[in-house]
Image (cartoon, grey):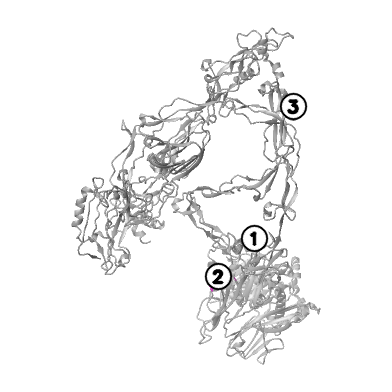
């Protein structure tokens, strides 16, 4: 913007109010753009006259100066992107008070115009102006008083609140109607309207909030707080009704305290309002409010409106004084006053500053407190003033760390958290209460309370009180024994003892304690008298006695007995004993008694006798006269007065008074059956007035008479039980209670019924409420235990244990562990302490069996069991599941052999072992064996074991048995040169014998054959030793390694042994050996030779051995066979189905027997003969069978069966083991169960399939699930074998042989692969299962099944070498936790989490192949447990339509005709079920007359225009692949109508008003229902019928009772009683009283009233001025105020509650309170910069005269000066970011870097976070 060439100035001075103020308008430098010529005028405020010239000239001199760049602020990021310069400095405020405006300018730096404003404003000087300052708009108007307007001077007055232009200066000439706009706009800061904060700025009205900010919409709440929530005041509303009497002309309506707002009072009636005010300074005032208008009452504006019978008073407030609103009586008519106002809460909590730090260095803490502050007096008061207001919530103390700088002797914190377990917070400690100052009537007991701190050793130390101020101080004074002291209670006076003249009357005076019990302890000095004179106005017709006659009537006796019934108390008193018997039996005698002065000793609870002088008051009489009746029938010479006095005129009383029934009491119950008791009164027979019951003879009192009443059942009501204990002790818990609707039918029968809740009309009380809503102390909160680390064998499970604090809102606050003071809960525990099932432990694979070419690798296996202690133990192999063949042996392929047959260069020792099995059948003396085999021998046979070795010295050979080293003994001989001899075998000799030659080890297993051809079990002790031996090994690998050396089976054993078929040596052969021993059907040609045996051999056996010989098969030789043969049989059996293994076992054993016989015939010398041989037995392996296994089985079966007919049997395919395929063979012949690898030179493949069954099964072939198509290349041979000529790649697959007959089928597969590549047997079918508990499918299938089913997925693979199977789920590899067995995957108890895609990957060295199966979990249709979704759907579909949810059992909905209804079918399932709707068994789609709509994907059926045909049963059928579900609901169309029923009971029994109303009922299907259902029906017209229009019998009529003659002390009320008769015409006529007397007793016309005592407040003198100090030299004194009768008898305070109670406390002057606070100088600041500097000073309470320190509570009437304050709170310059303590790593671990005090001390460490 450019500066114009010639700046101009103009000014004018105006004299205002003749003096000191001038208004200056200066047009400053005019800035404008050359293009648009914008002009901005500066406006100046009022300035003082003496300053005017200097300021004005200064402006003129400096107008051409260049603006100081420093006065402008730095350009903001926004300004830098535009052409604006930075904003200039703010101008001076337009006003010095009352709210003005200030502005700031900026320049446009570009040549073109800038977008936006170049000026901005803000408010300033937001302080109230003094009253003498006047109105700002009036000042501006008066500035024109010296300026002529149209040639004339005027005195101008402001015109405010112009609705059209509130910011123009409009003024009115005083005394005229002339209004002129003197200026187009007022000065900035002028209020737009008088009652608004909005101000004019630059001629425009700008909104200003209560926060005095431009543009703010903040408003004051009802309490006058800007943006407040109304919590600092409370709404007071009420109504007053005047009850003014003639002597009382005015009364107080309400007292409205200082500071109240929005006061509104409305008086209706003839009376008038007037006000009394009292300011805080004590000035009083009155205002009669006589006319309508606005008044200033007590400096508060009041708007008063008055009409004929209504007065309205409004005061916006805040009131500047206390107002007392009163009412003045003008007419006898009562008036009402309604009032409402907002009363300020003058006592509020105020948070104090932080108290001084608990430590000067090394880390301490400091706290805040809260004090109750009186806003009126601006001083701190006692806490109970703030506790009075429930809105007041006391702020919680705040705690922060302080003085974190290291102490000079150390360089770290004292503690990171100084308020943890080891440094607890200071607390209040109180001494026991002192004894009460008074035993009754209210006393005081006190105690000492001090602030103590506990150190780490538990020692208590007294500290300053401010340290405990974070919690309320424990009370030091409390009232005690507040019950009233015993006092005398005088009862009613008796009647006068005479009927004429002067007599005596008596009363009973009792000493009554606060419980109403008759006791002692009353002062005798204040006891009322029990006897006084009385005068009967009736004259006596006899000489007047000189003295009153002493009565001996019942009153005297009662008064005397009660008076004498004194009890011992803690004050000395006279205690009389009982009167003795009369000294005479007739006539006048005397009675005596003992009277003692006694006192109760409270400490020992015993009674002590005292001298008579110690007791105050008159001593009771110890002697009295007595009269025992006339002697000998003589009448004593007594005058009439004495006779009356002595006998008490009993005869007269007996005749004059008697008992009568007078009505009944009020019913004991209002409903449900109560009881009324007849009232028995003692009446005067002459006057019929009530009399004292003592005047009537007690023996004549009529019996108690009861009658039932209120027999109607009670209305239903809520029965409420007790609240249960709170569910939590802190935080926020819940309490519950039982609330049920009940009705009492009969209390007599104890009949109470429970009703539905809707039958109780009242609002149901809450059954749940929150409780214990306060913060809990920090505590340990454990999480759930994690799963056990092991499934068995002793594992560990962990959990997270955190220190948390449950807050009052139910949330949790996580805290550092040091906050929890108790011991931390365990975060780890043992679990699954059960033994694991036995499992195989496999060793590492051995090296390849060959150094080149194709070989095998083996590994060992032991059966291991993990015990519950976590220790592994080797157990019997029979306890482990069968081990797959592939687990112990696998092929290996090395580089091609260059020179086959290369000799080995190893020179390790070698044991030549014989892998044979020996079974001894004939009895022999001695047998020789070579290690490496198994021997099943007869007892008492001598055994010689030989261990042939190479490259090892035989004398060094060692022997072990079952792991224990063997030495020579009488039974076992360890011979040199590798021999071991056992003399006469016994059961303990069975076991594993190990021969060791250096590292080479071989074993020999010996087992014994017992009776009945059964094997003898090893002794238990030996077995336990064997099992216990490996347990000592902690490492499973060590156990396996040890077992390898102990058992040669694992190191040099046969193939079968290497495959790990059994871990217990020889145990897996036991079954086969047992069957072989039991085998029958041996060839007949051999039986004869068996009979030729050596007689000498027969004589060896004793008698006990003959039974054993008879049990054995008497073979002439010991059976010898290769271990390999038995391993093949066992492996063949393992591949058979479980149900056929027994059959196969018999066949294979029979085949083995045939082979043994053939071997014996062909090579008889190789078997052990009965004679003992020196050469160890060595057998030649049996040759291969020449015939098929099927023919052998058939032959054996035929021989065994003796030609009998074979039984029917379903097909069974025989599994046979073929020789290993040679890859170079051109023709491959194999049996089922093998794998064929096609090579380039393969010309033919022959697949054998042999099956047995009866009838003979039919054989068929399939490839990959499809029937084989035979051709000239694929042929079916006559023996049902399948031959493939010139196989090609298309022939690769799984070939299945199916055997079928009438009883069933069987199938077995064989795989044909290409060059050994992996092959997987697949299936492409879809299996849906909804019923079976378990299913099995091949890989490639799609499985759909319900939950809870066991699913087995077979992945049969083939390949050479054997392919390794790996399972995946959704591309994630499945671990060992899944059930994987020989390529199959078992999924147990499947659920939705098991759903997915399962992959089987088969891989070997030639490649890999992957197939998958999709598993879908079906969820059958069922009703969901949560119905909120379907209900919300029904509500959204038809918000106002009736709806019903279907259910399997059926639901019901009753509707009006013509309505519409929604039927919801809640259903869930997977896949989503399809829903079909039916009505009456027919699909709704086929019913043409049914108007319906199917919505929400079939879940909702809407039926419209319901009629008779629409009602009935609807059903929804939901079905999916998993099942079907049917749900039902019935719609019932109802109709209501009115029915005119019988007449009701007549309303009157006589007279002319009796009518009978016809009963109108609302019916539904002839059943009465609520009349609301018939609201829309036409109501039939009914007319009342007259009834009982006849004369009524005579009856008593009474008027209302008159006013009582006395207000207290007993008065009388009367009423008029007449006998009248009501005619049928309705006229009531008086009749004779006799006519009513015959029918009913005449009601009383007089009754007593206002029987209460006349009472008044009495008070004692003021006590000493020794109360607490409440100001300088000002204390409190007390006095006792009590209630008593007018004659001085003390009464409970409640009986005087209607009277204004005098004050019992007042202020008084006390020298002890002449105290004040004394402060010392501030100490030096602890820091020169930063945020932690503070300084302190000493503050103490001292006496003004002695200047000595006194207890601080004496100065509590005044605010305590602060004893510390912050100082030097300025940022420190050039501070290096480094750690200043060695605990910073701990701070980082505790995550305390976010706190400023830690962040600054650990700047380096926290900066890396």
Query: Which residue is drawn at the image coordinates 49% and 36% (left, top)?
Result: 271
Reply yes or no: does residue 1375 show up in magenta: yes
Q: Which residues are magenta?
A: 1371-1379
Along the line of sight, the residue nearer the viewer: 332 or 1058 = 332
Q: Which residue is mark 1?
A: 1442
The answer, for residue 678, to whether it is visible in the render is: no
Along the line of sight, the residue nearer the viewer: 1219 or 1485 = 1485
Mark 2 and mark 1 lie on one chain; the one further toward the N terminus is 2
Q: Quadrant of residue 1067?
A: bottom right
Q: CA distance from mark 2 to mark 1?
A: 55 Å
Q: Which residue is mark 2?
A: 1375
Residue 1491 vertical position relative to residue 405 in the rendered view, above or below = below
Mark 3 and mark 2 lie on one chain; the one further toward the N terminus is 2
Spot the residue most to the front.
Answer: 151
Q: Quadrant of residue 455?
A: top left
Spot the residue most to the bottom.
Answer: 1272
């Amino acid at each position: 913007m450019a500066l114009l060439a010639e700046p101009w100035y103009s000014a004018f001075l105006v004299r205002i109010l003749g003096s000191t103020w001038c208004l200056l308008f200066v047009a400053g430098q005019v800035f404008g753009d050359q293009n648009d010529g914008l002009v901005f005028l500066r406006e100046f405020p009022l300035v003082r006259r003496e300053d005017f010239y200097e300021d004005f000239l200064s402006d003129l001199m400096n107008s051409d100066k260049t603006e100081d760049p420093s006065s402008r602020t730095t350009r903001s990021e926004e300004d830098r992107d535009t052409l604006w310069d930075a904003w200039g400095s703010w101008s001076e405020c337009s006003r010095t008070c009352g709210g003005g405006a200030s502005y700031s300018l900026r320049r446009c730096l570009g040549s073109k115009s800038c977008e936006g404003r170049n000026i901005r404003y803000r408010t300033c000087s937001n302080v109230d102006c003094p009253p003498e300052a006047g109105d700002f708009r009036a000042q501006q108007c008066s500035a024109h008083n010296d300026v002529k307007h149209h040639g004339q001077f005027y005195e101008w007055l402001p015109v405010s609140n112009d609705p059209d232009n509130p910011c123009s200066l409009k003024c009115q000439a005083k005394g005229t109607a002339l209004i002129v706009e003197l200026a187009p706009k007022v000065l900035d800061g002028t209020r737009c309207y008088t009652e608004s904060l909005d101000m004019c700025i630059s001629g425009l009205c700008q909104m200003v909030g209560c926060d005095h900010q431009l543009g703010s919409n903040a408003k004051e709440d009802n309490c006058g707080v800007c943006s407040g929530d109304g919590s600092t005041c409370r709404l007071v509303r009420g109504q007053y009704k005047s009850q003014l009497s003639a002597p009382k002309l005015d009364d107080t309506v309400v007292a409205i305290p200082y500071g109240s707002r929005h006061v509104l009072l409305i008086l209706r009636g003839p009376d008038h309002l007037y006000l009394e005010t009292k300011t805080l300074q004590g000035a009083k005032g009155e205002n009669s409010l006589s006319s309508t208008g606005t008044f200033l009452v007590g400096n508060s504006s009041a708007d008063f409106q008055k009409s004929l019978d209504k007065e309205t008073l409004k005061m916006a407030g805040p009131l500047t004084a206390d107002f007392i609103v009163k009412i003045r009586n003008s007419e006898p008519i009562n008036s009402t006053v309604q009032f409402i106002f907002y009363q300020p809460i003058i006592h509020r909590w105020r948070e104090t500053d932080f108290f001084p730090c608990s430590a000067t260095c090394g880390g301490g803490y400091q706290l805040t407190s809260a004090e109750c502050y009186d806003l009126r007096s601006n001083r701190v008061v006692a806490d109970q003033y703030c506790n009075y207001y429930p809105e007041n919530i006391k702020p919680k103390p705040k705690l922060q760390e302080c003085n974190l700088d290291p102490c000079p002797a150390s360089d770290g914190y004292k503690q990171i958290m100084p308020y943890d377990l080891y440094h607890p917070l200071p607390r209040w400690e109180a001494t026991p209460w002192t004894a009460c100052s008074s035993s009754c009537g209210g006393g005081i007991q006190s105690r000492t309370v001090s602030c103590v701190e506990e150190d780490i050793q538990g020692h208590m130390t007294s500290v300053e009180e401010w340290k405990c101020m974070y919690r309320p101080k424990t009370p030091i004074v409390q009232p005690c024994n507040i019950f009233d002291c015993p006092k005398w209670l005088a009862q009613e006076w008796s009647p006068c003892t005479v009927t004429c003249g002067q007599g005596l009357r008596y009363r009973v005076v009792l000493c009554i304690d606060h419980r109403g019990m008759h006791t002692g302890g009353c002062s005798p000095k204040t006891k009322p008298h029990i006897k006084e004179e009385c005068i009967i106005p009736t004259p006596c017709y006899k000489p007047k006695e000189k003295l009153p006659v002493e009565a001996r009537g019942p009153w005297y006796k009662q008064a005397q007995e009660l008076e004498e019934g004194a009890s011992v108390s803690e004050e000395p008193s006279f205690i009389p004993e009982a009167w003795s018997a009369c000294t005479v039996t007739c006539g006048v005698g005397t009675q005596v008694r003992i009277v003692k002065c006694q006192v109760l000793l409270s400490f020992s609870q015993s009674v002590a006798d005292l001298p008579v002088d110690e007791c105050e008051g008159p001593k009771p009489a110890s002697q009295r006269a007595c009269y025992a009746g006339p002697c000998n029938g003589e009448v004593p010479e007594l005058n009439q007065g004495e006779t009356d006095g002595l006998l008490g005129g009993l005869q007269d009383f007996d005749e004059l008074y008697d008992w009568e029934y007078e009505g009944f009491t009020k019913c004991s119950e209002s409903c449900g059956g109560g009881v009324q008791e007849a009232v028995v009164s003692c009446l005067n027979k002459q006057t019929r007035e009530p009399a004292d019951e003592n005047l009537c003879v007690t023996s004549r009192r009529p019996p108690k008479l009861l009658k039932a009443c209120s027999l109607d059942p009670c209305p239903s009501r809520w029965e409420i039980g007790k609240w249960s204990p709170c569910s939590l002790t802190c935080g926020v818990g819940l309490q519950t209670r039982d609330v049920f609707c009940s009705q009492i039918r009969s209390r007599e029968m104890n009949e109470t019924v429970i009703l539905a809740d809707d039958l109780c009309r009242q609002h149901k009380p809450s059954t749940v409420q929150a409780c214990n809503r306060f913060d809990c102390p920090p505590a340990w909160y454990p999480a759930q235990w994690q799963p056990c680390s092991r499934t068995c064998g002793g594992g560990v499970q962990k959990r997270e244990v955190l220190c948390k604090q449950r807050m009052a809102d139910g949330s949790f606050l996580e805290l550092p562990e040091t906050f929890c003071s108790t011991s931390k809960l365990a975060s780890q525990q043992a679990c699954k302490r059960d033994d694991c099932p036995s499992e195989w432990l496999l060793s590492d694979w051995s090296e390849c069996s060959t150094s080149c070419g194709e070989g095998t690798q083996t590994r060992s296996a032991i059966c291991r069991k993990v015990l519950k202690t976590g220790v592994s133990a080797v157990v019997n192999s029979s306890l482990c599941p069968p081990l797959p063949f592939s687990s112990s042996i696998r092929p290996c392929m090395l580089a091609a052999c260059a020179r086959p047959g290369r000799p080995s260069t190893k020179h390790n020792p070698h044991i030549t072992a014989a892998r044979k099995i020996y079974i001894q059948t004939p009895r022999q003396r001695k047998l020789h064996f070579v290690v490496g085999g198994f021997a099943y021998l007869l007892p008492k046979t001598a055994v010689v074991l030989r261990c042939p070795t190479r490259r090892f010295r035989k004398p060094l050979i060692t022997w072990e048995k079952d792991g224990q080293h063997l030495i020579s003994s009488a039974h076992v001989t360890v011979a040199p040169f590798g021999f071991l001899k056992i003399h006469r075998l016994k059961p303990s000799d069975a076991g594993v014998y190990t021969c060791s030659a250096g590292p080479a080890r071989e074993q020999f297993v010996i087992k014994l054959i017992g009776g009945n051809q059964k094997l003898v079990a090893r002794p238990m002790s030996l077995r336990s030793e064997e099992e216990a031996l490996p347990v000592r090994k902690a490492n499973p690998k060590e156990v396996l390694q040890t077992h390898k050396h102990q058992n040669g089976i694992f190191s040099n054993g046969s193939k079968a042994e290497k495959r790990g078929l059994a871990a217990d040596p020889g145990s897996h052969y036991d079954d086969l050996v047992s069957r072989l021993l039991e085998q029958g059907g041996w060839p007949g040609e051999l039986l004869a030779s068996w009979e030729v045996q050596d007689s000498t051999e027969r004589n060896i056996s004793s008698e006990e051995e003959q039974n054993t010989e008879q049990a054995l098969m008497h073979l002439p030789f010991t059976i010898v066979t290769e271990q390999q043969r038995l391993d093949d049989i066992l492996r063949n059996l393992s591949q058979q189905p479980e149900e056929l293994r027994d059959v196969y076992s018999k066949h294979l054993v029979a085949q083995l027997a045939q082979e043994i016989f053939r071997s014996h015939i062909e090579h008889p010398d190789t078997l052990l003969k009965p004679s003992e041989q020196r050469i160890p037995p060595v057998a030649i392996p049996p040759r291969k069978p020449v015939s098929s296994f099927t023919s052998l089985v058939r032959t054996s079966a035929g021989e065994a069966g003796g030609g009998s007919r074979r039984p029917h049997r379903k097909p069974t395919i025989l599994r046979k083991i073929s020789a290993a395929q040679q890859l170079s063979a051109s023709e491959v012949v194999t049996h089922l169960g093998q794998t064929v690898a096609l090579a380039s030179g393969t010309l033919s493949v022959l697949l054998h399939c042999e099956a047995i069954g009866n009838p003979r099964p039919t054989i068929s072939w399939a490839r990959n699930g499809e029937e084989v198509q035979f051709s000239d290349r694929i042929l079916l041979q006559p023996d049902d074998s399948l031959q493939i000529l010139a196989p090609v790649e298309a022939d690769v697959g799984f070939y299945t042989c199916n055997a079928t007959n009438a009883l069933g089928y069987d199938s077995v597969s064989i795989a044909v692969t290409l060059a050994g590549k992996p092959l997987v047997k697949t299936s492409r079918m879809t299996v849906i299962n909804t019923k079976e508990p378990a299913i099995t499918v091949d890989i490639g299938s799609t499985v759909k099944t319900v939950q809870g089913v066991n699913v087995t997925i077979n992945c049969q693979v083939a390949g050479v070498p054997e392919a390794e199977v790996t399972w995946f789920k959704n591309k994630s590899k499945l671990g060992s936790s899944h059930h994987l067995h020989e390529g199959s995957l078992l999924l147990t108890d499947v659920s939705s989490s098991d759903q997915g895609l399962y992959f089987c990957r088969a891989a070997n060295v030639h490649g890999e192949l992957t197939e998958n199966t999709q598993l879908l979990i079906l969820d059958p249709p069922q009703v969901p447990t949560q119905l909120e979704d379907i209900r919300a759907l029904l509500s959204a579909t038809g918000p106002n339509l009736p709806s019903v949810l279907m259910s399997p059992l059926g639901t019901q909905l009753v509707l009006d005709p013509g309505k519409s209804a929604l039927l919801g079918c809640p259903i869930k399932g997977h896949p989503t079920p399809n829903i079909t709707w039916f009505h009456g068994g027919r699909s709704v789609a086929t019913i043409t007359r049914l108007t319906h709509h199917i919505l929400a994907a079939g879940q909702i059926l809407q039926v419209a225009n319901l009629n008779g045909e629409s009602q009935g049963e609807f059903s929804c059928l939901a079905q999916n692949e998993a099942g079907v579900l049917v749900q039902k609901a019935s719609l019932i169309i109802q109709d209501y109508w009115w029915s005119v029923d019988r007449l009701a009971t007549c309303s009157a029994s006589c007279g002319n008003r009796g009518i009978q109303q016809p009963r109108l009922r609302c019916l539904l299907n002839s059943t009465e229902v609520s009349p609301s259902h018939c609201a829309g029906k036409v109501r039939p017209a009914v007319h009342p019928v007259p009834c009982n229009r006849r004369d009524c019998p005579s009856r008593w009529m009474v008027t209302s009772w008159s006013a009582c003659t006395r207000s207290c002390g007993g008065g009388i009320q009367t009423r008029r009683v007449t006998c009248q008769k009501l005619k049928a015409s309705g006229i009531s006529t008086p009749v004779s009283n006799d006519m009513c007397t015959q029918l009913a007793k005449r009601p009383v016309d007089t009754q007593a009233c206002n029987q209460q005592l006349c009472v008044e407040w009495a008070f004692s003198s003021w006590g000493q001025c020794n109360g607490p100090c409440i100001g300088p030299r000002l204390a409190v004194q007390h006095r006792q105020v009590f209630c008593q009768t007018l004659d001085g008898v003390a009464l409970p305070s409640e009986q005087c509650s209607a009277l204004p109670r005098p004050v019992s406390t007042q202020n008084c002057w006390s020298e002890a309170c002449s105290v004040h606070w004394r402060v010392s100088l501030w100490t030096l600041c602890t820091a020169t910069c930063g945020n932690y500097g503070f300084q302190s000073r000493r503050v103490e309470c001292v006496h003004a005269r002695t200047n000595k320190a006194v207890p601080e509570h004496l100065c509590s009437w005044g605010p305590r000066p602060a004893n510390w304050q912050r100082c030097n709170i300025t940022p420190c310059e050039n501070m290096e970011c480094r750690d200043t303590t060695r605990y910073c790593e701990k701070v980082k671990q505790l995550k305390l870097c976010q706190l400023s005090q830690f962040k600054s001390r650990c700047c380096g460490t926290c900066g890396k976070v």
